[in-house]
Amino acid sequence: AVQEKLQRERNLLRILIDHTPDLIYLKDDLSRYLLVNKSLAHFVNRNPQELIGRTVFDLYETEFAKQFQQDDEAVLKTGQALIDIERSGHNLQGEAIIFKTTKVPWKAEDGSVIGIVGISRDITQLKILEAQSLALEAEQQRVYAMQAFINDFSHDFRTPLSIINSSTYLLHKVTDAQKREVHLERIEEQSKRLLGFLNDFMEMAQLDNEDIVLEDVRFEFNSLITQVVQDFSASATLKQIDLEWIPADQPIYIRGNSAYLSRAVLNLVQNAINYTPSGGSISIQTARVDEQMMLTITDTGVGISESDLPHVFERFYRADKARSASTGGTGLGLSIARKIIEGHQGAIRLESQVGVGTTARVTIPLAHAATT
């Protein structure tokens, strides 16, 4: 009776094992199959009895099988279970497979490890669906960002066009030379603003469609900053902003594309000027720090809120939409700067406090020797 009861329990267990979709198996201490369920046999298109005595190298391509073999050896050697280990590769037909596997040691009465009990689940389709879901989510976020940009930017784009149209109309009506000059200046100013919009779009598209060309050119970075400061000195003076330039006490050489890097720095300084009120100050400083060039741009501007700070490098993101009409920003300046800097194996980060100001820190590897 006891033997019959044990047999019934074995049969029930076998029925359960054979009808689970997971791949269940028992291996000896040489990683040879001693028992497999129907799901495993069906997965590899074999009869269950055909798999007895075989190894994973008979079922999967070599590199994939090596992963399983290494897992087996780890369990046999340590006597410790491996839980939910993901392994990916191909079957003998070249089809991609991803398994989530748990392997536990099979121990004799004396505690020695004599084999492995394993259960593997084919999660290939799940991973594909997850990847598709992430891609869809990313695309939705891109669409939402673009829609938000279009909604916000359409007003900004209409504003200069409206000013140009009204100034053009008035230009035809007035005869006073001084008033005509005022309208012409307004038209010129708004035309430059529109051109700036288009330049940002075109530059971002160019950076997306081709890698930044890191020319094998070694140049002195302080000279680049000196030129940028000269370019902005008139704007800073007009806005009554103290623009301070503190170069490193020795030349700083880096290698890369000086035109691209100049644009990145121009964007950062332009942002500082845009968001620093009259009477404020901007400090630009370079230094050598641990085989890196560090550029620090600090302003006493309006600052960026803690909630906005993580998003300022996102395309079309503008922390204060109310200021966009006056600053004329597309929300691409910081995105362009980061892409250029990272293309030179550099990094950029912002620190900011509302009402106090913002500091941008840029690091780029130094170039110690010129190439010929």
Image (tube, helix red, strand yellow):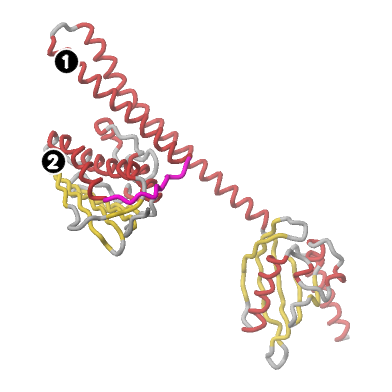
Q: How many labels does the image show?
A: 2
Give the residue drawn at x 29%, y 27%. Answer: 193
The x, y position of residue 52, in whole percent, is 84, 74
Q: Which amino acid does label 2 sit on?
A: Ile
Which is more N-terminal, label 1 or label 2?
Answer: 1
Q: Which amino acid does label 1 sit on?
A: Glu
Q: How crowded is mark 2: few (under 14 residues within 10 Å), some or many (20 or more)?
A: many
* Badge 2 element: loop
Disc 1 secondary structure class:
helix
Q: In which quarter of the image is residue 67?
A: bottom right
* Residue position for label 1: 181
Which residues fall within the magenta stretch?
210-220
Pick the quarter of the image with the N terminus: bottom right
| Residue 278 location (% of width, % of height) | 13, 38
Q: Can residue 311 be seen in this view?
A: no
In the image, is residue 153 above or below residue 229? Answer: above
**Residue visible at 27% across and 41% down?**
266
Q: Name the residue under label 2.
A: 241
**Does residue 14 sit above or below 239 in this rendering?**
below
> Is 107 part of what is drawn in magenta?
no
Name the spot of residue 137 as percent of width and height, x first. Answer: 53, 45
Residue 324 showing in the rendered view:
yes
Q: Distance between the residues labelled 2 and 1?
A: 27 Å
87 vs 271: above or below = below
At a point 82% along the width and 76% down the height, the residue shown is 53
What secondary structure is the stretch in magenta mostly built from? loop
| Left or right: 135, with 309 as reference point | right
Residue at 14 percent of width and 35 percent of height: 239
